[in-house]
Image (spheres, rainbow, N blue to C red):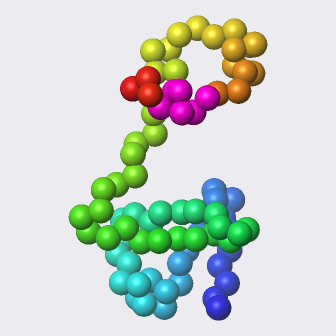
Amino acid sequence: METVTLSTKGQLVLPKRVRDALRLKPGQRLSVAVENHRIVLEPSRPGEPAAPAWQPVNPAGARLSAADLCRPVDIKREAGRR
């Protein structure tokens, strides 16, 4: 197992041996997940849809009070507002 160092910007450099073994190319997207306290990276394959772009929870830019900002967000309800 190889060791990498996390940069101050949260970046990692995958060792060449790993990139070559998985045939990773510059600019290729990787899916990231946490499973059982481990980081799992999976390369996207050609033809797979890209991850959805980030969307703001408040796309209309409504003015929110401090109390509104501190209230928990119901992600399922917000996802249906698109």
Which residue does the image show at 67% across and 84% down from the upper left? Answer: 3
Task: Give the percent coordinates (x, y) of residue 6.
Answer: 67, 68
Q: On screen, 80 above or below 25?
A: above
Is-magenta flag for residue 19?
no
Along the horizontal axis of the image, is 46 left or right of 33? Answer: left
Taking the image as shown, residue 34 lies to the left or right of residue 26, namely right
Q: Could you say where residue 1 lies in the image, as x and y percent from the top left?
A: 65, 91
Q: Nearer the viewer, residue 55 or 82?
A: 82
Q: Quadrant of residue 36?
A: bottom right
Residue at x 40% of width, y 63% of height: 29
Magenta residues, start to end? 74-79
Above-or-below relation of 15 to 27: below
What residue sits 54% from the left and 33% below the top? 76
In the rendered view, tell whether residue 78 sits above or below residue 5.
above
**What kind of secondary structure does the magenta stretch mostly adopt?**
helix
Of the pair 17 and 8, the residue shown nearer to us: 17
Residue 34 spot, x, y in % from top left: 64, 63
